[in-house]
Every structure is written in structure tokens, then in C-alpha cells.
Amino acid sequence: MNAFEALGLNEQLVQSVTELGFETPTEIQTKAIPVLLSGTTDFIGLAQTGTGKTAAFGLPLLQLIDGTQRHPQALIVCPTRELCLQITNDIENFKKHNRNIYTEAVYGGASIMMQIRNLKRGVHIVVATPGRLIDLIERKAIDLQKVKYVVLDEADEMLNMGFRDDIDFVLKNTINRESTWLFSATMPPEVRAISKNYMETPKEVTVGKKNSGNANIDHQFFVVGAPHRYEALKRLIDFNPGMYGIIFTRTKADAQEISERLAKSGYEIEALHGDLSQQQRDKVMGRFRSKNLQLLIATDVAARGIDVDGITHVINFELPDDMEVYTHRSGRTGRAGKTGVCLSICHSREIYKIRSLERMINSQFHKVDVPSGKDVCRKQFFHFMDKLMQADVSHGDYETYMPDLMEKFANVSKEEVLQRVAALEFSHFLKYYENADDLNTRDRNDRRTERSGDMNGSRKERTNFNRGNSGYTRLFVNLGTKDGFYKASFLQFILDESNLNKEVLGKIDMREMNSWIEIDQAAAGKMIKAIDGKRYNNRTVRMNEADGGFKRPSDEGRGGEGRKRIYASKEKRSFR
């Protein structure tokens, strides 16, 4: 008997999964399918992304659906458009031998009128994102009164994205449901509250431990000084030439800035963040799925629901503030029995987070040194030589050219050929890394790094740049987010005004009323001269060295701007 047939699935479904190449059910499928086939048991499945959850609920749904009743009988709610489309596609594959069941994906960013027309034709299974589903309910374009089965997929992610009220609304409007199935990678209190409010004695199944990580993932962390995060990131990418991965940042400004810097250096990378239109997002994801991009850099919100096979590495440019988010990030790799690597770039003050994560996911993290410049060059060189030796020469009329090649290289030794190949292929790497610093070395200023709230209330790093840190000076300017700036536009403003190159800048710390800029000491005077005294939004811009005191121009007195500078001055002193 087929392993899937033994779980209770009918012949058509078993035939479909067999043709898809599935031979053995995953653990979550083995534990969930027999329970869900009853159709009357509320269910909680705790399992990491990529463990086969879609088949765990999709196959039982298809068997329970009555194809003769052309109305929504099952509702699957998920956090993002990408996951919505993925689930719909999987269900279409599962029902290959049962064409009498119709599904419809409803999500934002697509024509709502087209979705309404498809729903009116009659469908059995609706896969939806919360926002678009609520819109359809309020338009009375979808009838949930006859829905028997409600599936909440990636429940913890939906709650992290602020969909709690939407989930409540949906569950209150599916009053005739026979069972609710909740799938989640973690079990925070908010998810537990949903089960208590809307489920009756649910059967709970856990694959691995609650909030645990995938055992196939190697968790590594690197401790560097705060100003060296970008250089550490670049070096880690160069040290893993076969990498196909996702880089996570906290903010969309960081994602865009890092993407631009790496793209300018020749890396195949694009950013995914909330400022992209749906069309731009689809284009980026299409290029990444087809592996025309080596790297995708994304914020946590933008990356919700992304499910791409074969990701080898996940890199945390910064550790997330919410430790449970780490589980979602790292879960993008190490899927379907494959191994993966999750790399985290940390500061010494974040070691406590690493220890907390080890306890939370019950997995050991390995402290690894950032590779030296020579290590990177060596790794790149041998990767190239491996590709050279594995090159397929069976196709092509190479023999025609061999006499000319043999004549050309008659007086050249094998060693010289190899040297010339290395020079031709790796001159840029050798030049870039010949005097590369040891990024694992930290001076006293790095150890004095402090933690304070940024403009969004999250805890971010601030290094004391006022005391001679690596040739940088720290400047104060009385412009901030209240002036309508975000990081990218602020960066553009100061560079345009000063006519300086972005390479002279280090960390930029923006607050509501003012900002601090780390800049090469040799360029600090030019920036101050160019910007101090300028007018912006009908007020005078003041810029000076952060440890040189704050100027109080006589023409501004102690009014609104004076109060802002007093506030900023107090804030500045707190960093010393």
C-alpha cells in the first residue's frame, strides 16, 4: 500500500502526489492528514515553513469537498500574495485527477472585479489574503455562510503583520464552519488566544519543539565593530561564491542602500521592500526564482510568505528585535531535507541575543571569524578552478582550434598559464583584498558601543564616534525625520549639497529633530562648510562636529528652533 494511501487519502489524490514525485509523507503530513480527514476536529499544527504544511491541509480539504455543491466550502487565509498564489498552485497540482473542484485566489494588487466574477461563477476553495478577503466580504461578493472548513496558514506571521482584527472578523463571519485548522511556525500568546477564542478542544501536533528551528540549518554568527557591518557582509558573500540567498535588514532604507552599493560593485542583487509596486515586486521575485539574481535583500514585512526552493544561505545584516522573527528568517533555507546556513552579523553587545536564540530554538550557534582577505581570494580562486575542471567540452568543435592553441602556448609553462588565468580572472579581488583589515579586531570604542532607541522605538546600535574612531568624525545637523526625511532622501540631500562621494560616509543616525553623521575626517570640513547656514523649509540648517558644542545663532533666539537645539544638546551629552 502506498504511504499516502495508508493515511486515508483516496485513489485520485494518491495518484496526483505520486506523479508529483512524493513518495514518503513528511512528519506534519503523517500526523495531520488522518486527523483532518474527519472534517470535524479543530486542529493546531506547529511546524516550520518548508515542512510540507500545504499538502498536510490541502489534501484532506480536496477529499472533503463536495464537488456537486458550487459554493465556497473551504477558506484558506494566508499573510501574503506570494503564499496565496503558491498554495493555490499546489492545490491545483493535487487535484489534477479531480477537475470538478474549483479554486480561486483572492489577493490585493490584482483586479478585484475579475476575482468577483470568478467567485460568482462558483468555486469550492477560496485562498485569500486578509485585506482583500475583508474587502470582498464588505462588498457582499463572497458568501461565507456555507464555509465548512477554515484554514489559517502562517498564523504567527499574519499576527506579526497586524492582521489580528481581520482574523477575528473572518472567524466571526464563518459561523457554520465544522472545523478550524491553524498552522504556525511558532506559538506566541496571540496565536494561543485565537485557539482559545475560536476553537473547541483542538488536536495539537508539534513537529520538533515549539518555536524550534530546523535541524538542517547551520547557525553561525560573526562579531564585528558597528561601522564594519557592510564590509563583513560583502566579505561573507565573496567567501561563498555559490551562494543563492536572502539578506534581511530591519528597514527598507537599509535594504535599498545596501542593494545599490552591492549592485554597483557587480553583484546580482535587488531589494524587496514596501515602497515597490506590485508589478515591481513580481518582477524582482520572478528574477530571483529563475536564479537570474544571486541575492535578494528584504525587510521582514516584504519577505513574508516568500517560498523559494534551493536557498543556500540566509544572512541577518542585523539581528531582529523580535527573536521569533529569527525563526522565520532562518526557515527560508534548509528545506525539503536539504541543508542550509544562516549567518548573523553581530556586535559584541548582541551576544546575549545569540544565547537567547540558542535556548529558544534549541540549537547551537557557532561563532566564526569573518574571513581574511587572503581567505576570500583563495576561496574564489579554487571555486573558479573547480568550475574550470568541470566545464563540459564534449560539445563544440574545439579540436579545430587545438593546433593553433598548442602553437600559441608552445613556450609557456603550465605554471605560467595558471598564473595568467588567475591574473585575468581575479585581479579585482586581489586588488580589493590585498590590504584588507581584520574585521574581527575591535578597539575600545567598539566595546563602548551603546544601545538607544531609534526613531521607531527599536533598539539600534550607536558607536561613540567622538573619540577618534578609525579616522572618522561625527557631525551633528539639526535636520531629522520631522523635516520629511527618511534615510535615503537625507543621504541624497547632504551629498548633493556638499558634492561629496558616498564612500566618505559611515553610519548615519537619524532622529526626529536632528541627525548624526559619521564622515571621513578629511571630508568633514567640506561638508560643514557646504551645509552649515543653508536654508531648508524656511529655517537655517546648522551643522558642526558633535563634540564641538552647538552653535546658537543670535537671529533665532530661544524659540522653537532654540528649544530643539537645547533638546539635541542634552541628547548629545547622553552619548558621552
Image (cartoon, rainbow, N blue to C red):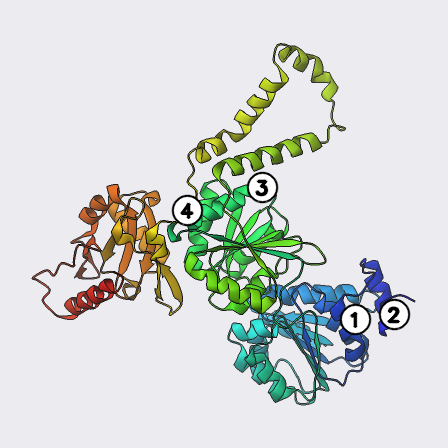
Q: Nearer the viewer, residue 66 or 57?
A: 57
Depth check, mark 3 against mark 4: the one in front is 4
Q: CA distance from mark 3 to mark 4?
A: 24 Å
The residue located at (47%, 45%) in the rendering is: 262
Question: Above or below — where is 81 with respect to 298?
Answer: below
Q: Amino acid at mark 2?
A: Glu
Quick check: marks 1 and 2 in contact, CB under 8 Å? no
The residue located at (83%, 60%) in the rendering is: 23
Residue beneath disc 3: 241
The residue located at (57%, 37%) in the rendering is: 379
Depth check, mark 4 against mark 2: the one in front is 4
Residue beneath disc 2: 5
Disc 4 or 2, which lies upstream in sequence?
2
Q: Is residue 460 left or right of residue 359?
A: left
Determine crowd level at label 4: few under 14, some 14-19, many 20+ residues with C-alpha closer than 10 A.
few
Depth check, mark 4 against mark 1: the one in front is 4
Residue beneath disc 4: 441
Q: Residue 452's x, y, as percent?
A: 34, 66
Disc 2 or 3, which lies upstream in sequence?
2
Q: CA distance from mark 4 to mark 1?
A: 50 Å
Determine crowd level at label 1: few under 14, some 14-19, many 20+ residues with C-alpha closer than 10 A.
some
Report the disc number at residue 174.
none
Question: Above or below — where is 33 with respect to 401?
Answer: below
Q: Nearer the viewer, residue 229 or 349?
A: 349
Q: CA distance from mark 4 to mark 2?
A: 58 Å
Quick check: marks 2 and 3 in contact, CB under 8 Å? no
